[in-house]
Image (cartoon, helix red, strand yellow):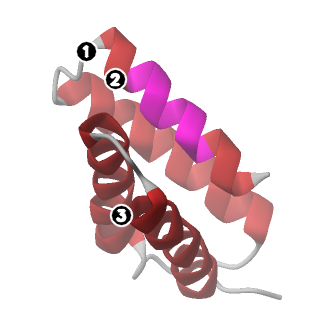
Amino acid sequence: MITFAERSDALSEQLRELEHQADDGDQLFYCAYLLGLLGLHSAVEGEGVEEFDAYFETELKTTLAAEGVTDKDQDAILGLWKQVTQ
């Protein structure tokens, strides 16, 4: 079974690829935001793709709300998260 660290690394790799292909500042911001948060949570112990994704999405939503990210940016960041986790 895949560990949380392995899942975080795989998602980070996908986001880095999207970041390199990004052609606007907003997309760069959304990728960087997710990459930063993934880095903070990559050391959490656990196993399972679905388990990590559920855990991280909860943390992501909590962090977005706590940091006062605009609704537009929240929607875009959550949309990017859905894109890389499919």
Q: Residue at x 41, y 61 (%)?
A: 19
The type of residue carrying mark 3 is Leu
Q: Nearer the viewer, residue 16 or 45?
A: 16
Q: Are marks 3 and 2 in contact (CB under 8 Å)?
A: no
The spot of residue 80 in percent (x, y) is: 55, 41
Q: Secondary structure at mark 3?
A: helix
Q: Which residue is mark 1?
A: 70
- Mark 3 or 2, nearer chain start: 3
Q: Residue at x 16, y 30 (%)?
A: 67
Determine whether, in the image, residue 50 is placed left or right of residue 60: right
The spot of residue 32 in percent (x, y) is: 29, 56
Determine whether, in the image, residue 52 is placed left or right of residue 70: right
Which numbered disc covers residue 84?
none
Quarter of the figure with residue 10: bottom right
Q: Which residue is mark 2?
A: 73
Residue 67 painted magenta: no
Q: How many marks?
A: 3
The spot of residue 26 in percent (x, y) is: 30, 35
Quarter of the figure with residue 52: bottom right
Quarter of the figure with residue 62: top left
Q: Which residue is mark 3?
A: 35
**Magenta stretch in the rendered image:** 74-81
Q: Are marks 1 and 2 in contact (CB under 8 Å)?
A: yes
Disc 1 and disc 2: Cα gap in Å? 5 Å
Residue extending farthest left: 67
- Which quadrant, please, contains the N terminus? bottom right
10 Å neighbourhood of mark 3: few (<14), some, or many (≥20)? many
The type of residue carrying mark 2 is Asp
